[in-house]
Image (cartoon, grey):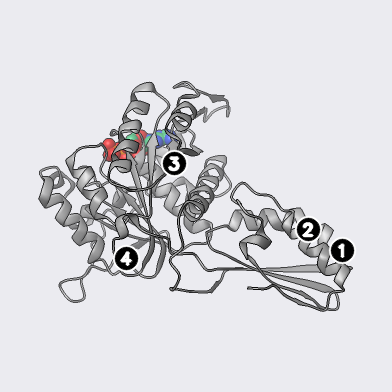
Amino acid sequence: MAIQVSNLTDAQEKQVISLLQGFQHETLQKDLVTLGAIKKIEKGVDTLRIELSLPFAWNTGFTQLQSALTASLLQATESKEVKWALTYQIATLKRANNHPAVKGVKNIIAVTSGKGGVGKSTVTVNLALALKAQGARVGILDADIYGPSIPHMLGAANQRPTSPDNQHIVPIEAHGLFSNSIGYLMEADNATIWRGPMASSALSQLLNETLWPDLDYLVIDMPPGTGDIQLTLSQQIPVTGAVVVTTPQDIALLDAIKGITMFQKVSVPVLGVIENMSMHICSQCGHHEALFGTGGATKLAEKYQVKILGQQPLHIRLREDLDKGTPTVVAAPEDEITQSFLQLAEKVASELYWQGSVIPGEILFREVK
Ligand SMILES: Nc1ncnc2c1ncn2[C@@H]1O[C@H](COP(=O)(O)OP(=O)(O)OP(=O)(O)O)[C@@H](O)[C@H]1O
């Protein structure tokens, strides 16, 4: 769609477009003009109004755009103020194996790990909250039937979902995320006795019978490992893209490779790898130290041609905040840990878009700024 331009001279229009086109950002594989993100440029007496619409969550990018260009735009158009507006029209992307969509859900991101204990749930919760902070509507499904820890991490362990018709489940809302988990429905100890077919049918029920409100992204905390259950689930769930969480140790990296290979086998696109506990940040002095070594994830990414989506720090605060039920991304929005999750979220959302193919249709506009 052409950009609507009003009240600018030809020279001014050219200059404004060239400034917008020149803005570079890690998340932009095409410039904003070519992407079709610029909708309107309008000159008032003293103001310049610029309207954008993005197909992926991009609040941080939008802030950076404003600080990078405002001064030059004012000069180019002899204005006193730039009024920026961003709406989202988050794209629905093609699902693995052409599965039908889950009602209300545009895109599913499966968070997986080759082995347990690498911090998959920690990353899932903070990533989901960071996607929300980036401007998206987000849900979280705890599919880790062996250790459903999401309710606890969201501070919602005592809540129980309701069912309006004895068939569907209303998700629990916590910190603005809509969540469901086996953990809400039964005591955690019982979950460990769940076996293959029972577990996967319970999960597809949980996924399909939850009354999800309109969501841009549903983030799923998958069970760890690469066994039969994980394989069956990856085949069953209408995933848009999977991310593999690993730590820098060789052994975790080997398991991450198994995870990547498993998804490739069942034709689920792997968006990339997230290296958790990448760098230890000392809570006393802020010193950064690579406790578990460096470079492993980079080598893995090169060898298997997947991207590194983020490198998340090892910090005691991440664990403490989750234990209190207030994840760091909401407890400390300005902290460097939160900044690293915001960066991760922006990368995941944009990679999902660039690596995927858009399913036209479902168009929803929302004013966010
Ligand atoms: N980056 C980190 N910094 C500090 N603590 C962390 C970090 N990542 C995870 N932890 C802590 O490590 C423990 C294990 O993390 P978590 O439960 O997220 O792992 P997991 O991979 O989901 O485990 P499983 O899938 O086996 O249940 C938790 O106590 C969590 O708070």
Q: Amino acid at mark 3?
A: Gly
Q: CA distance from mark 2 to mark 4?
A: 39 Å
Q: Are marks 2 and 1 in contact (CB under 8 Å)?
A: yes
* Visible residue check, residue 80: no
Residue at 52% x, 59% y is: 56
Q: Amino acid at mark 2?
A: Leu
Q: Position of residue 95 (x, y in %)?
A: 35, 58
Q: Is residue 91 above or below residue 31?
A: below
What residue does disc 1 label?
Answer: 76
What residue does disc 3 label?
Answer: 272
Horizontal side of 355 relative to 210 (left or right) equals right
Q: Position of residue 166 (x, y in %)?
A: 15, 73
Label 2 CB, ligand 1: below 8 Å? Answer: no
Q: Are marks 2 and 3 in contact (CB under 8 Å)?
A: no
Q: Are marks 1 and 4 in contact (CB under 8 Å)?
A: no
Q: CA distance from mark 2 to mark 3?
A: 32 Å
Place residue 40 in its image quadrant. bottom right
Taking depth in this image into account, of 258 and 168 the one nearest to the observer is 258
Label 4 CB, ligand 1: below 8 Å? Answer: no
Mark 2 vs 4, N-terminal side: 2
Residue at 20% x, 43% y is: 146
What residue does disc 2 label?
Answer: 19
Q: Position of residue 86 (x, y in %)?
A: 62, 67
Q: Amino acid at mark 1?
A: Ala
What residue does disc 4 label?
Answer: 101
Q: Amino acid at mark 4?
A: Ala
